Image (cartoon, rainbow, N blue to C red):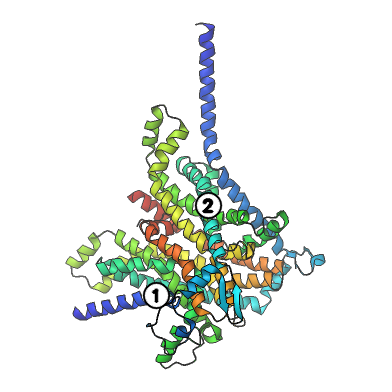
Amino acid sequence: MNGKSVLRAVALTLIGLFFLFPLFWVVLMSFMTNADILRNPPSPFFTPTLHNYTALVSGNLGTNVGTQKIDYMLNLFNSTVLSGFSVILSLILGVPAAYAFARYKFRLGEDMAFTLLSFRFAPPLLVLLPLLMYFQSIGLYDTYFGLVWVYQLITLPLVLWIVRGYFEDVSEDIELAYRLDGHSWLRTFFRISIPLARPGIAAAALLSFIFAWNNFIFALILGSSGVQPVTVGALAFVTASGIEYGQIAAALVFSIMPTLVLAVFTQRYLVEGLSLGAIKG
Amino acid sequence: MSNSGVASMNARSALKRRRARMANLLPYLLSMPALLACIGILVPFGTAVFYSLERYNLAFPSTRGFIWFANYISLFSDGSFWRTILVSMTYTVLTVGLELLLGLGIALLLWRRSLVTNLLSVALILPLMVAPAIASLMWKLMTNANFGILSYFVSLLGVHDFKWASAPQSAMFTVVLVDMWVYTPFISILLLAGLRGLPRQPFEAAELDGVPGSFVFFRIMLPMLLPYILTAGLFRMLDSIQQFDIIYSMTQGGPGDTLMVFQVQAYTQAFIFTNIGRASAILMVLWIITYALSNVFVKNWLRLRERARGQA
């Protein structure tokens, strides 16, 4: 019995190390000077510096060939704009549709729900290549609007399927009772149905924000540096800043912080969201 | 009955009829945006099918023309495409297999609630929330030959000069490791939820009867957990076979063609060799595979979903 619990403790420690050490070490690196980083053997004891972060915020970055202007803050701003507006648009478009799919059984509805679901699993490049050609000819290439539109591919199926499940759980009787009191359909929808499905809407919103934030390939194909989010910006940043490893680490920390903080709030909904409502947490 | 009475009755029934018609239209009205989104996907999809049947190279616009299945024939008679298939399959089998094993192990370890397991199951969420493209860059920093902490650890174990993603022998190992770091938590979180949702009675009965642990594991728990394992595994398989972010950020498909999986190969064809026709054909082959897989997945997922709704 004792041997078993020791084994268990060792296994738990190893798991904790494997999943947390990379995050811990990159955060540590972001507070090191390059000299500290290059020290051999590496050491977790050093005088922390904020220099990497101030350089990032000011946009004047030291590189191997002197200082260079790299506007990584713009990438952060782009990520926020793209993910934020994508989620808002998805909620406006997706919540009523999710309600329709949950309440009214109609053939076209099922077909649409499953088409959107099946393209959630289709290779993104397949749709992105033709879209690139279209976008270039109608002037949507390299615009926030175009990208937010395409981001619906990620966020809309999530909203649709998660919120649909919550609407299915809301009893129709409550809605009918309210309607019999003489309230309009619209009023019932906003006063009864939406508040009752609020946890699902919150879960869908948080998760789709995270998925949009973490997306890489859409903006890589459909935008240039002006509108690109941190995921694409970070790759360019690594190439541009060459050997300034502390700054790279700081840039990576900046780009993962928002989703890590949101993760704490999504916790409760995570299981349901990740399985698109198939498993209850 | 007065005239006005008839008129008002007519008006009322007209209103009722209009209401009924509205009620019939309502679902379509509400789902209009979703319909537009569907069209928004299906149109470019149709275009991609068309591209894949064309000789279409951006560098030679004048040679563009319809060539039926020539792109596909040239793909399948070309060794490099078979290599792409092999690399993609290897990546998928390794990542899904290892993640399922590790994920199941972790879920079992975290099954019993305690302070440590609760903290650890929160900690597991963190890697899953890191963008895969960024995760790759983090691991790139840690495996750097000059100062990477992992290179240092490996050298302590007596392996000097381990080249990680920059050597063909270890490149696959490195990206699989990154994939495992990001996605194993996905599997363990889903399986843990599945485990905690299992009924207790069979386990209690088995314990009372003194049934050996291995029998409980293989004959009671695994079969009951199977729908969850299938859903999580298929979900990951669908993502894994189309992996782009991790591999592209790490090596862009190199060294050489070591890591040229479907989407990285298609990207290279489209943006380095400007060969849109060939890139589209590669993506169509990938689409057929994912479409078949997703049908199996959706069937299984719907069953679980029904059950979850039933429990609510």
Q: Which residue lies furthest to the top in this view?
A: B2
Tell whether B120 sits left or right of B238: left
- Identify the secondary structure beneath mark 2: helix
Q: Position of residue A199 (x, y in %)?
A: 38, 49
Looking at the picture, which amino acid does disc 2 mark?
Phe
Q: Where is residue B110 shown, x and y percent of the image?
A: 30, 68
Q: Do labels 1 and 2 share a chain?
A: yes
Q: Earlier in the sequence, mark 1 or mark 2?
A: 1
Label for residue A114? 2
Left or right of B301? Residue A144 is right
Height in image: B7 above or below B142?
Answer: above
As measured in the structure, the alpha-carbon distance from the residue carrying label 1 to the one carrying label 2 is: 41 Å
Q: Quadrant of residue A192?
A: top left
Whether residue A271 is visible here, answered yes or no, is no
Give residue A24's mark: 1
| Mark 1: secondary structure | helix
* Quarter residue B72 falls in: bottom right
> Residue at 59% of width from left, 67% of height from top?
B286
Q: Which chain carries label 2?
A: A
Q: Nearer the viewer, mark 1 or mark 2?
A: 1
Residue closer to the observer: B230 or B186: B186
